[in-house]
Image (cartoon, rainbow, N blue to C red):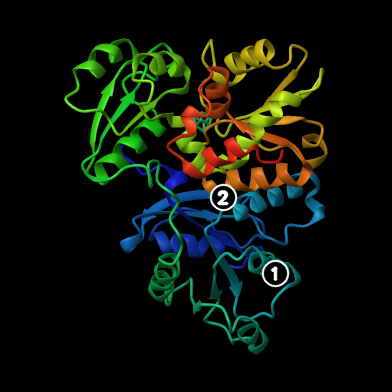
Amino acid sequence: MINTPLAEQVRIVLAGDRNSGKSSLMNNLFGKEISIVTDRPGTTTDPVTKSFELGPLGPVAFSDTAGLDDDERDGEIGAHRRRRTEELLREAHLVLLVTPGNRPLSLSEKALLEAIRSSGRPVVAALTFADRPTDASKVEALRDLPHATVDNLSGRGVMELRKLLIRVAEGIDPEMTPVEGLVQEGDLVLLVIPIDLAAPKGRLILPQVETIRDLLDRDCGVLMVKERELYEFYRALPRRPKLVICDSQVFSKVAADVDADQPLTSFSILFGRKKGDLAAYVRGVRALGQVPPGARILVLESCSHHRQADDIGTVKIPRLFKQLVQQDAHFSFARELPPDEELKGFFMVINCAGCMASRLKIMHRLHTMQRLGVHTLNYGLFLAWANGLLPRALEPFPYEYAVFLRGAPLV
Ligand code: SF4
Protein backbone atom coordinates (compact mmCIF):
# COMPACT_ATOMS: atom_id res chain seq x y z
CA MET A 1 0.00 0.00 0.00
CA ILE A 2 1.40 3.38 -1.03
CA ASN A 3 -1.12 5.88 0.29
CA THR A 4 -2.64 6.46 3.72
CA PRO A 5 -6.17 5.01 3.50
CA LEU A 6 -8.89 7.65 3.22
CA ALA A 7 -10.56 6.29 6.37
CA GLU A 8 -7.41 7.15 8.37
CA GLN A 9 -7.02 10.73 7.12
CA VAL A 10 -8.36 13.87 8.76
CA ARG A 11 -11.43 14.81 6.71
CA ILE A 12 -12.18 18.43 5.99
CA VAL A 13 -15.50 19.07 4.25
CA LEU A 14 -16.13 22.34 2.41
CA ALA A 15 -19.75 23.35 2.84
CA GLY A 16 -21.63 26.43 1.75
CA ASP A 17 -24.35 27.75 -0.51
CA ARG A 18 -24.17 27.42 -4.28
CA ASN A 19 -21.70 29.86 -5.87
CA SER A 20 -20.10 30.70 -2.54
CA GLY A 21 -16.69 29.90 -4.02
CA LYS A 22 -16.20 26.36 -2.62
CA SER A 23 -14.81 24.85 -5.80
CA SER A 24 -12.51 27.82 -6.48
CA LEU A 25 -11.28 27.61 -2.90
CA MET A 26 -10.66 23.86 -3.21
CA ASN A 27 -8.59 24.55 -6.35
CA ASN A 28 -6.69 27.33 -4.58
CA LEU A 29 -5.97 25.13 -1.55
CA PHE A 30 -4.57 22.43 -3.83
CA GLY A 31 -2.84 24.83 -6.19
CA LYS A 32 -4.44 23.15 -9.21
CA GLU A 33 -7.84 22.44 -10.72
CA ILE A 34 -9.63 19.77 -8.69
CA SER A 35 -13.22 20.99 -8.95
CA ILE A 36 -14.96 22.47 -11.97
CA VAL A 37 -15.63 26.18 -11.56
CA THR A 38 -18.34 28.08 -13.46
CA ASP A 39 -20.63 31.02 -12.74
CA ARG A 40 -23.65 28.71 -12.98
CA PRO A 41 -25.01 27.82 -9.49
CA GLY A 42 -24.91 24.12 -8.60
CA THR A 43 -22.02 23.03 -10.86
CA THR A 44 -20.69 20.64 -8.20
CA THR A 45 -23.16 17.77 -8.22
CA ASP A 46 -21.47 14.77 -6.64
CA PRO A 47 -18.89 15.56 -3.97
CA VAL A 48 -15.24 15.62 -5.03
CA THR A 49 -12.73 14.22 -2.50
CA LYS A 50 -8.97 14.64 -2.86
CA SER A 51 -6.07 14.38 -0.45
CA PHE A 52 -2.91 16.36 -0.01
CA GLU A 53 -0.20 16.73 2.61
CA LEU A 54 -1.19 19.59 4.89
CA GLY A 55 2.00 20.43 6.77
CA PRO A 56 2.45 18.49 10.02
CA LEU A 57 -0.97 16.82 9.66
CA GLY A 58 0.23 14.59 6.81
CA PRO A 59 -2.36 13.59 4.19
CA VAL A 60 -5.70 15.32 4.70
CA ALA A 61 -8.83 14.55 2.67
CA PHE A 62 -10.76 17.58 1.41
CA SER A 63 -14.29 17.16 0.06
CA ASP A 64 -16.04 19.75 -2.07
CA THR A 65 -19.82 19.42 -1.79
CA ALA A 66 -22.97 20.52 -3.60
CA GLY A 67 -24.59 23.75 -2.37
CA LEU A 68 -26.48 23.71 0.93
CA ASP A 69 -29.23 25.71 -0.75
CA ASP A 70 -29.72 23.16 -3.55
CA ASP A 71 -33.49 23.54 -3.73
CA GLU A 72 -36.52 21.40 -4.51
CA ARG A 73 -36.63 22.59 -8.12
CA ASP A 74 -34.13 19.89 -8.87
CA GLY A 75 -36.52 17.26 -7.45
CA GLU A 76 -34.89 13.87 -6.89
CA ILE A 77 -31.47 15.01 -8.05
CA GLY A 78 -31.45 17.93 -5.60
CA ALA A 79 -32.54 15.60 -2.78
CA HIS A 80 -29.78 13.14 -3.71
CA ARG A 81 -27.14 15.90 -3.64
CA ARG A 82 -28.33 17.10 -0.25
CA ARG A 83 -28.23 13.54 1.12
CA ARG A 84 -24.65 13.07 -0.11
CA THR A 85 -23.64 16.41 1.40
CA GLU A 86 -25.24 15.45 4.74
CA GLU A 87 -23.43 12.09 4.72
CA LEU A 88 -20.10 13.81 4.14
CA LEU A 89 -20.78 16.36 6.86
CA ARG A 90 -21.45 13.53 9.33
CA GLU A 91 -18.01 12.11 8.49
CA ALA A 92 -16.20 15.44 8.69
CA HIS A 93 -13.61 15.93 11.42
CA LEU A 94 -13.63 19.62 10.57
CA VAL A 95 -16.15 21.62 8.55
CA LEU A 96 -14.90 24.50 6.42
CA LEU A 97 -17.83 26.86 5.94
CA VAL A 98 -17.28 28.75 2.70
CA THR A 99 -19.40 31.87 2.77
CA PRO A 100 -19.38 35.06 0.69
CA GLY A 101 -18.07 37.84 2.93
CA ASN A 102 -20.15 40.41 1.07
CA ARG A 103 -23.57 38.89 1.90
CA PRO A 104 -25.47 38.31 5.17
CA LEU A 105 -25.63 34.78 6.61
CA SER A 106 -28.26 32.77 4.72
CA LEU A 107 -30.86 30.50 6.33
CA SER A 108 -29.08 27.37 5.11
CA GLU A 109 -25.76 28.61 6.51
CA LYS A 110 -27.41 29.34 9.85
CA ALA A 111 -28.94 25.86 9.93
CA LEU A 112 -25.56 24.29 9.13
CA LEU A 113 -23.79 26.23 11.87
CA GLU A 114 -26.41 25.18 14.43
CA ALA A 115 -26.10 21.54 13.41
CA ILE A 116 -22.29 21.59 13.59
CA ARG A 117 -22.24 23.39 16.92
CA SER A 118 -24.65 20.86 18.45
CA SER A 119 -22.43 18.01 17.19
CA GLY A 120 -19.44 19.62 18.93
CA ARG A 121 -17.25 19.41 15.85
CA PRO A 122 -14.82 22.18 14.92
CA VAL A 123 -15.70 24.61 12.17
CA VAL A 124 -13.58 27.17 10.35
CA ALA A 125 -15.10 29.89 8.16
CA ALA A 126 -13.59 31.12 4.91
CA LEU A 127 -15.07 34.48 3.91
CA THR A 128 -14.81 34.58 0.14
CA PHE A 129 -15.18 37.46 -2.32
CA ALA A 130 -12.66 39.53 -0.36
CA ASP A 131 -12.42 41.83 -3.39
CA ARG A 132 -15.94 43.13 -2.65
CA PRO A 133 -17.23 45.32 0.23
CA THR A 134 -17.65 43.31 3.43
CA ASP A 135 -21.10 42.76 4.95
CA ALA A 136 -20.85 43.84 8.60
CA SER A 137 -23.60 41.45 9.77
CA LYS A 138 -21.68 38.46 8.34
CA VAL A 139 -18.50 39.42 10.19
CA GLU A 140 -20.53 39.86 13.39
CA ALA A 141 -22.30 36.50 12.95
CA LEU A 142 -18.99 34.64 12.53
CA ARG A 143 -17.06 36.60 15.13
CA ASP A 144 -16.70 33.62 17.49
CA LEU A 145 -15.44 31.24 14.81
CA PRO A 146 -11.87 30.87 13.60
CA HIS A 147 -12.05 32.51 10.19
CA ALA A 148 -9.97 33.86 7.33
CA THR A 149 -10.77 36.17 4.45
CA VAL A 150 -9.99 34.85 1.00
CA ASP A 151 -9.95 36.29 -2.49
CA ASN A 152 -10.26 33.32 -4.81
CA LEU A 153 -9.31 35.34 -7.88
CA SER A 154 -5.88 36.44 -6.64
CA GLY A 155 -5.34 33.66 -4.08
CA ARG A 156 -4.94 36.26 -1.34
CA GLY A 157 -5.66 34.81 2.10
CA VAL A 158 -5.28 31.14 1.05
CA MET A 159 -1.98 30.68 2.95
CA GLU A 160 -3.51 32.16 6.10
CA LEU A 161 -6.48 29.81 5.72
CA ARG A 162 -4.16 26.81 5.38
CA LYS A 163 -2.34 27.78 8.58
CA LEU A 164 -5.66 28.20 10.37
CA LEU A 165 -6.86 24.78 9.21
CA ILE A 166 -3.63 23.18 10.45
CA ARG A 167 -3.94 24.89 13.84
CA VAL A 168 -7.56 23.80 14.35
CA ALA A 169 -7.06 20.29 12.94
CA GLU A 170 -4.10 19.67 15.27
CA GLY A 171 -6.59 19.74 18.15
CA ILE A 172 -8.65 16.86 16.73
CA ASP A 173 -8.27 13.59 18.61
CA PRO A 174 -6.81 10.95 16.31
CA GLU A 175 -8.70 7.69 15.79
CA MET A 176 -7.58 4.84 18.05
CA THR A 177 -4.93 2.59 16.50
CA PRO A 178 -5.50 -1.19 16.18
CA VAL A 179 -3.42 -2.38 19.17
CA GLU A 180 -3.63 0.73 21.34
CA GLY A 181 -3.40 -0.20 25.02
CA LEU A 182 -2.85 -3.89 24.25
CA VAL A 183 0.93 -4.16 23.89
CA GLN A 184 4.14 -2.56 25.10
CA GLU A 185 7.57 -1.93 23.60
CA GLY A 186 9.47 -5.20 23.22
CA ASP A 187 6.40 -7.47 23.13
CA LEU A 188 6.18 -10.23 20.58
CA VAL A 189 2.87 -10.48 18.69
CA LEU A 190 1.93 -13.37 16.44
CA LEU A 191 -0.40 -12.71 13.51
CA VAL A 192 -2.18 -15.62 11.85
CA ILE A 193 -3.07 -14.73 8.26
CA PRO A 194 -4.76 -17.25 5.97
CA ILE A 195 -3.68 -17.01 2.34
CA ASP A 196 -6.67 -18.72 0.77
CA LEU A 197 -8.76 -18.10 -2.34
CA ALA A 198 -10.45 -15.16 -0.64
CA ALA A 199 -7.11 -13.41 0.00
CA PRO A 200 -6.38 -10.62 -2.53
CA LYS A 201 -3.61 -11.51 -4.95
CA GLY A 202 -0.15 -10.32 -3.98
CA ARG A 203 -1.03 -8.22 -0.95
CA LEU A 204 -2.37 -8.20 2.58
CA ILE A 205 -5.69 -6.62 3.51
CA LEU A 206 -6.03 -3.26 5.24
CA PRO A 207 -6.62 -4.47 8.85
CA GLN A 208 -3.50 -6.65 8.61
CA VAL A 209 -1.34 -3.87 7.14
CA GLU A 210 -2.50 -1.31 9.70
CA THR A 211 -1.95 -3.72 12.59
CA ILE A 212 1.60 -4.55 11.45
CA ARG A 213 2.45 -0.87 11.08
CA ASP A 214 0.99 -0.09 14.52
CA LEU A 215 3.03 -2.88 16.14
CA LEU A 216 6.22 -1.66 14.46
CA ASP A 217 5.47 1.91 15.57
CA ARG A 218 5.24 0.56 19.11
CA ASP A 219 8.62 -1.21 18.83
CA CYS A 220 7.07 -4.66 19.08
CA GLY A 221 8.24 -7.80 17.34
CA VAL A 222 5.78 -9.06 14.72
CA LEU A 223 5.70 -12.62 13.48
CA MET A 224 3.30 -13.69 10.71
CA VAL A 225 2.30 -17.20 9.86
CA LYS A 226 -0.48 -18.96 7.97
CA GLU A 227 -2.84 -21.10 10.01
CA ARG A 228 -1.43 -24.32 8.55
CA GLU A 229 2.09 -23.65 9.88
CA LEU A 230 0.94 -22.19 13.18
CA TYR A 231 1.18 -25.32 15.32
CA GLU A 232 4.87 -25.94 14.48
CA PHE A 233 5.95 -22.29 14.66
CA TYR A 234 4.17 -21.63 17.93
CA ARG A 235 5.94 -24.51 19.62
CA ALA A 236 9.32 -23.44 18.25
CA LEU A 237 9.06 -19.90 19.63
CA PRO A 238 11.70 -18.99 22.24
CA ARG A 239 9.07 -17.05 24.20
CA ARG A 240 5.33 -16.88 24.33
CA PRO A 241 3.67 -14.06 22.32
CA LYS A 242 1.98 -11.32 24.30
CA LEU A 243 -0.95 -11.65 21.93
CA VAL A 244 -2.08 -13.78 19.02
CA ILE A 245 -4.26 -11.99 16.45
CA CYS A 246 -5.95 -14.07 13.78
CA ASP A 247 -8.44 -13.80 10.97
CA SER A 248 -11.94 -14.51 12.37
CA GLN A 249 -12.43 -17.31 9.89
CA VAL A 250 -9.66 -19.46 11.41
CA PHE A 251 -10.54 -18.75 15.05
CA SER A 252 -11.24 -22.31 16.13
CA LYS A 253 -8.11 -23.80 14.50
CA VAL A 254 -5.91 -21.09 16.02
CA ALA A 255 -7.49 -21.54 19.45
CA ALA A 256 -6.80 -25.27 19.24
CA ASP A 257 -3.16 -24.79 18.16
CA VAL A 258 -2.04 -22.34 20.85
CA ASP A 259 -1.93 -22.73 24.64
CA ALA A 260 -5.36 -22.61 26.29
CA ASP A 261 -4.36 -19.51 28.28
CA GLN A 262 -2.69 -17.72 25.33
CA PRO A 263 -4.27 -14.24 24.90
CA LEU A 264 -6.04 -14.38 21.55
CA THR A 265 -8.29 -12.11 19.51
CA SER A 266 -9.10 -11.29 15.87
CA PHE A 267 -8.44 -8.45 13.44
CA SER A 268 -12.19 -7.96 13.17
CA ILE A 269 -12.55 -7.49 16.93
CA LEU A 270 -9.63 -5.02 16.93
CA PHE A 271 -11.36 -3.03 14.20
CA GLY A 272 -14.75 -3.35 15.90
CA ARG A 273 -13.15 -1.45 18.80
CA LYS A 274 -11.18 1.00 16.64
CA LYS A 275 -14.03 1.98 14.33
CA GLY A 276 -17.08 1.40 16.48
CA ASP A 277 -18.19 0.35 19.96
CA LEU A 278 -17.06 -3.10 21.05
CA ALA A 279 -19.24 -2.99 24.17
CA ALA A 280 -22.33 -2.42 21.98
CA TYR A 281 -21.41 -5.50 19.95
CA VAL A 282 -20.92 -7.49 23.17
CA ARG A 283 -24.48 -6.60 24.16
CA GLY A 284 -25.56 -7.72 20.70
CA VAL A 285 -24.15 -11.19 21.42
CA ARG A 286 -26.63 -11.53 24.28
CA ALA A 287 -29.48 -10.74 21.91
CA LEU A 288 -28.62 -13.85 19.90
CA GLY A 289 -30.56 -15.81 22.52
CA GLN A 290 -33.72 -13.86 21.73
CA VAL A 291 -33.97 -13.94 17.95
CA PRO A 292 -37.61 -14.76 17.08
CA PRO A 293 -38.59 -16.97 14.11
CA GLY A 294 -38.80 -14.91 10.92
CA ALA A 295 -36.53 -12.18 12.33
CA ARG A 296 -35.04 -9.90 9.70
CA ILE A 297 -31.26 -9.58 9.90
CA LEU A 298 -29.24 -7.00 7.96
CA VAL A 299 -25.59 -7.60 7.07
CA LEU A 300 -24.09 -4.13 6.68
CA GLU A 301 -20.83 -3.74 4.81
CA SER A 302 -18.90 -0.50 4.40
CA CYS A 303 -17.40 -0.66 0.93
CA SER A 304 -17.95 -2.21 -2.46
CA HIS A 305 -15.24 -4.88 -2.15
CA HIS A 306 -15.33 -7.78 -4.60
CA ARG A 307 -17.47 -10.56 -3.11
CA GLN A 308 -15.91 -14.02 -3.18
CA ALA A 309 -17.71 -17.33 -3.80
CA ASP A 310 -17.84 -18.19 -0.08
CA ASP A 311 -18.08 -14.57 1.01
CA ILE A 312 -17.98 -14.04 4.76
CA GLY A 313 -20.78 -11.47 4.98
CA THR A 314 -23.21 -12.73 2.38
CA VAL A 315 -22.64 -16.49 2.61
CA LYS A 316 -20.76 -17.74 5.69
CA ILE A 317 -22.38 -15.60 8.38
CA PRO A 318 -25.98 -16.17 7.19
CA ARG A 319 -25.28 -19.92 6.93
CA LEU A 320 -23.84 -20.11 10.47
CA PHE A 321 -26.60 -17.88 11.84
CA LYS A 322 -29.29 -20.18 10.45
CA GLN A 323 -27.49 -23.25 11.77
CA LEU A 324 -26.80 -21.92 15.26
CA VAL A 325 -29.30 -19.15 16.00
CA GLN A 326 -32.52 -19.11 14.01
CA GLN A 327 -33.28 -21.33 11.03
CA ASP A 328 -36.09 -19.00 9.85
CA ALA A 329 -34.11 -15.74 9.89
CA HIS A 330 -34.40 -13.59 6.74
CA PHE A 331 -31.19 -11.93 5.59
CA SER A 332 -30.74 -8.67 3.69
CA PHE A 333 -27.47 -7.06 2.61
CA ALA A 334 -26.52 -3.40 2.26
CA ARG A 335 -23.48 -1.14 2.00
CA GLU A 336 -25.14 2.00 3.28
CA LEU A 337 -27.40 2.47 6.28
CA PRO A 338 -31.05 2.25 5.13
CA PRO A 339 -33.51 5.04 6.06
CA ASP A 340 -34.98 4.84 9.60
CA GLU A 341 -38.34 3.44 8.44
CA GLU A 342 -36.64 0.50 6.76
CA LEU A 343 -34.01 -0.02 9.44
CA LYS A 344 -36.67 -0.28 12.16
CA GLY A 345 -37.91 -3.48 10.53
CA PHE A 346 -34.69 -5.35 11.32
CA PHE A 347 -34.16 -7.28 14.55
CA MET A 348 -30.39 -7.06 14.26
CA VAL A 349 -27.63 -5.55 12.12
CA ILE A 350 -24.36 -7.46 11.74
CA ASN A 351 -21.65 -4.95 10.81
CA CYS A 352 -18.46 -5.65 8.89
CA ALA A 353 -15.14 -4.60 10.46
CA GLY A 354 -15.48 -1.21 8.74
CA CYS A 355 -11.79 -1.06 7.78
CA MET A 356 -12.50 1.26 4.83
CA ALA A 357 -14.87 3.54 6.76
CA SER A 358 -14.15 6.31 9.23
CA ARG A 359 -15.00 5.89 12.90
CA LEU A 360 -17.41 8.84 12.61
CA LYS A 361 -19.38 6.97 9.95
CA ILE A 362 -19.62 3.73 11.92
CA MET A 363 -20.50 5.53 15.15
CA HIS A 364 -23.30 7.37 13.37
CA ARG A 365 -24.65 4.00 12.26
CA LEU A 366 -24.47 2.57 15.77
CA HIS A 367 -26.17 5.61 17.33
CA THR A 368 -28.97 5.33 14.76
CA MET A 369 -29.47 1.62 15.54
CA GLN A 370 -29.47 2.32 19.25
CA ARG A 371 -32.05 5.11 18.82
CA LEU A 372 -34.30 2.76 16.87
CA GLY A 373 -33.84 -0.18 19.26
CA VAL A 374 -32.14 -2.40 16.66
CA HIS A 375 -29.59 -4.87 18.06
CA THR A 376 -26.09 -4.62 16.66
CA LEU A 377 -23.22 -7.05 16.31
CA ASN A 378 -20.08 -7.30 14.21
CA TYR A 379 -18.54 -10.09 12.14
CA GLY A 380 -15.68 -10.71 14.57
CA LEU A 381 -17.79 -11.11 17.68
CA PHE A 382 -20.38 -13.23 15.90
CA LEU A 383 -17.68 -15.58 14.60
CA ALA A 384 -15.95 -15.72 18.00
CA TRP A 385 -19.30 -16.63 19.58
CA ALA A 386 -20.09 -19.18 16.84
CA ASN A 387 -16.70 -20.84 17.44
CA GLY A 388 -17.20 -20.99 21.20
CA LEU A 389 -14.45 -18.40 21.77
CA LEU A 390 -16.33 -15.96 23.97
CA PRO A 391 -15.37 -14.60 26.39
CA ARG A 392 -11.83 -15.74 25.58
CA ALA A 393 -11.45 -13.49 22.51
CA LEU A 394 -12.44 -10.53 24.72
CA GLU A 395 -9.88 -11.17 27.48
CA PRO A 396 -7.39 -8.62 26.06
CA PHE A 397 -10.09 -5.92 26.51
CA PRO A 398 -10.84 -5.68 30.25
CA TYR A 399 -13.84 -3.35 29.96
CA GLU A 400 -15.67 -5.29 27.24
CA TYR A 401 -14.76 -8.57 28.96
CA ALA A 402 -16.40 -7.26 32.14
CA VAL A 403 -19.47 -6.15 30.15
CA PHE A 404 -19.76 -9.67 28.78
CA LEU A 405 -19.39 -11.32 32.21
CA ARG A 406 -21.78 -8.86 33.85
CA GLY A 407 -24.45 -9.63 31.30
CA ALA A 408 -25.07 -5.96 30.47
CA PRO A 409 -28.60 -5.01 29.35
CA LEU A 410 -29.64 -5.64 25.76
CA VAL A 411 -29.29 -2.86 23.11
S1 SF4 B 1 -16.77 -4.73 3.59
FE1 SF4 B 1 -16.11 -3.81 5.53
S2 SF4 B 1 -14.53 -5.19 6.39
FE2 SF4 B 1 -14.82 -5.71 4.21
S3 SF4 B 1 -13.23 -4.54 3.16
FE3 SF4 B 1 -15.12 -3.28 3.12
S4 SF4 B 1 -14.97 -1.99 4.97
FE4 SF4 B 1 -13.45 -3.62 5.23
Q: Sort mark 1 into few (<14), some (14-19) or many (20+) by Cα contacts within 10 Å.
A: few
- Residue 3 or residue 66, whichever sits in front: 3
- Tell me the kind of residue under disc 2: Leu
Q: Sort mark 2 into few (<14), some (14-19) or many (20+) by Cα contacts within 10 Å.
A: some
Residue 355 in sight in this render = no
**Which residue in the structure is indicated by mark 1?**
114
User: Is 74 placed left or right of 353 in the picture?
Assistant: right
Q: Is residue 132 above or below residue 331?
A: below
Q: Residue 360 carries which label?
A: 2
Q: Residue, x 63% and y 12% (percent of image)?
A: 319
Q: Residue, x 75% and y 71% (percent of image)?
A: 107
Quadrant occupied by the C terminus: top right
- Tell me the kind of residue under disc 1: Glu
- Residue 124 or residue 299, whichever sits in front: 299
Q: In this view, does 231 lie above or below 366?
A: above
Question: Residue 31, position in %: x, y?
Answer: 38, 61
The answer to which image quadrant residue 365 occupies is: top right
Q: Quick one: label 2 or label 1, which is nearer the N terminus? A: 1
Question: Residue 102, position in %: x, y?
Answer: 62, 81
**What element does badge 1 sit on?**
helix
Question: Residue 403, position in %: x, y?
Answer: 59, 41
User: Is 371 placed left or right of 118 in the picture?
Assistant: right
**What element does badge 2 sit on?**
helix
User: Is 74 placed left or right of 311 in the picture?
Assistant: right
Question: Residue 181, position in %: x, y?
Answer: 38, 47
- Residue 149 or residue 246, whichever sits in front: 246
Task: Point out the residue furthest to the bottom here.
Answer: 136
Q: Residue, x 31% and y 62% (percent of image)?
A: 56
User: Is 118 placed left or right of 217 in the picture?
Assistant: right
- Of labels 2 and 1, the one closer to you: 2
Q: Does the beta carbon at disc 1 come under 8 Å from ligand 1?
A: no
